[in-house]
Amino acid sequence: MREPTVGRVALVWRGDPKDEPPTPSATRFHLIFSALSARGLAAEPVLYCEEMEDQIRASLLAVDGVLVWVNPLDAGKNRSRLDPLLRDVAARGVWVSAHPDVILKMGVKEVLYRTRALGWSADIDLYPSVDDFICRFPARLAAAGPRVLKQNRGNAGQGVWKVELVSDVGPNPGPSAPVRVLHALRGSVPESLSLGAFMQRCRSYFAGYGRIIDQAFQPRLPEGMIRCYLSQNEVVGFGQQLIKALVVAADGEAAQPGPRIMHPADAPPFKELRDKMETEWVPAMQALLDIPTASLPALWDADFLYGPKAPDGRDTYVLCEINVSSVAPYPDSAAPKVAEAALAGVRAAISARS
């Protein structure tokens, strides 16, 4: 039996609000719409674009909760205007997931560096300025082998590069040292250029609060990536992708991602990873970043690569990214948990306003 209506929730993603509102059952969020309705939450789509901010603000202030799917970078647009709008809506008593302040704590690449002591990281560094990057990166590249550089906020492989020296140039490579680079953006191909030219290309990543994260390249990358989906502090499923960007195929081109195979939260191959996430890594991250469980996103994911085999032959895992801004696709098993988190958030927001 469907519950009586207990609140209203808006699902936000990019689009043209002047268009006819999409039918929820025809969208990629249809399972979440259904799960929200089953829990007594009236859910409606709200299409976001910068040109209609006043109307969108009014729509969001008229509901009790907001679930957001908007990428950090999308066709030349970013969230520089959306995030202040969401902060304002939240400050006026509407539950928002994911809140922009939470995204800045856990949904940017810097989280890999800040949480490096938790046990889910690898050899990693951070460059807070372009001068620091130009000063320290060449020697690190020469000493540590192939590196993966990541701009602080991005998606779909934008601003993520594999970098390796072409020849032995000593411990302090100069700007003319030859490097081979590969962008993680789909369709990219390996490129040869000088180290100095590549570093100059990265200047734009330091704009604003920009910075670059530097991780060791993981040799087991061709074995695939495991995406661990969570609703707040509970694992709700896994996605396994056997081919990932930054892999060079036999023909010298960049290998492209294959299909993502979804698994339920209790899938036996991922039991150890699930246990580590729920009992060790997520609680430790929350404590380090000061994120209460109720503030964790209703839907987020952590991407892991396979690290070196343990002495007893077990797999180890290396965190390569946390996605918070726009998690899709997701396993069917996630929808009921997202709805439960939304219901709890809406009830808390309504209670606080009473």
Image: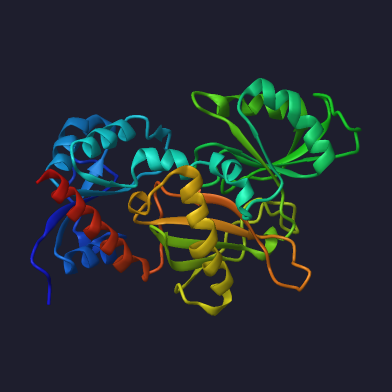
Q: Is residue 192 left or right of residue 246?
A: right
Query: Where is residue 12 drawn, in percent x and y?
Result: 26, 47
Seen at 56% across and 29% down, the residue is: 205
Identify which residue, 29 or 206, lies in the foreground.
206
Query: Compared with residue 55, is residue 335 higher up or lower down, i.e. above or below?
Result: below
- Tag count in the figure? 0
Task: Please name the residue shown 69% across and 27% down the image.
Answer: 133
Q: Is residue 55 left or right of residue 230?
A: left
Q: Furthest residue to the front?
A: 287
Question: In the rendered image, which quarter contains the N terminus?
Answer: bottom left
Q: Which corner quadrant of the image does residue 181 belong to?
A: top right
Q: Residue 341 at x, y = what percent?
A: 29, 59
Residue in the foreground of this view, choosing between 113 and 38: 113
The answer to whether residue 138 is above or below residue 182 is: above
Along the line of sight, the residue nearer the viewer: 288 or 143: 288
Rendered image quadrant of residue 92: top left
